[in-house]
Image (tube, helix red, strand yellow):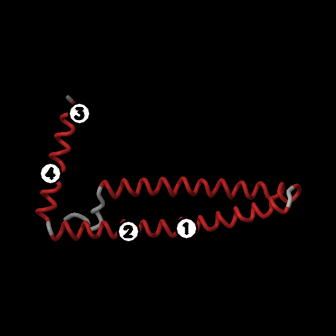
Amino acid sequence: MPSKNNHSGSHEQSERGSGERVVSDFKKLVGDTEEFLASSAGVVTQYASDTAHDARDRLKKSLDTAKRTLAETKELVVERTKDAAKATDTYVRENPWKAVGIAAGAAWLMGIFMRRRRK
């Protein structure tokens, strides 16, 4: 009997991969910005004007806001993905023959496209 948790499709995996890539890129940006802020603290303190201090403080506040927003967005995406998977699972359980027909039709179309591609 198939596992109840084994209902994620390639679309969900694709979205998860894209989402993970965005999160990874954003985390790298945050890390680089934090590193810049830490390394520039001494320089700003020694040589810069109040304007530079204000700009540095605004950047830090914006970075903190972005980190919170990322965490909230990630939670929302995970929640929506779970909801979509549950809805799909429910639909397939309630309409198994429709789901089989849809899957067979999709496989047939893919076969046609792949055959044309080889020619």
Label 1 crowd bin: few (<14), some (14–19), many (20+), radius 10 Å: few
Q: Nearer the viewer, residue 17 or 2?
A: 17
Q: Which residue in the structure is indicated by mark 1?
A: 69
Alpha-carbon span between mark 3 and mark 2: 35 Å
| Most distant residue in the front direction | 51
What amino acid type should be assigned to the residue bearing mark 1? Thr
Q: Which of marks 4 and 1 is nearer the N terminus?
A: 1
Using residue 35 as the reference point, say whether residue 19 is left or right of it. Answer: left
Residue of label 2: 80
Horizontal relation, residue 42 to residue 16: left or right: right
Query: Counting other residues with Cα less than 10 Å from the Cα at mark 2, is it few (<14), some (14-19), or many (20 or more)?
Result: few
**Residue 18 image position (x, y, % from top left):** 43, 53
Residue 93 occupies which quadrant of the picture? bottom left
User: Mark 3–mark 4 contact, CB under 8 Å?
Assistant: no
Quadrant where the N terminus lies? bottom left
Q: Earlier in the sequence, mark 3 or mark 1?
A: 1
SS state under label 1: helix
Horizontal placement of 96 versus 51: left or right?
left
Q: How far apart are marks 4 and 1 (CA)?
A: 41 Å
Q: Which mark is residue 117?
A: 3
Q: In this view, does 55 lie above or below 114?
A: below
Tag 4 residue = 105
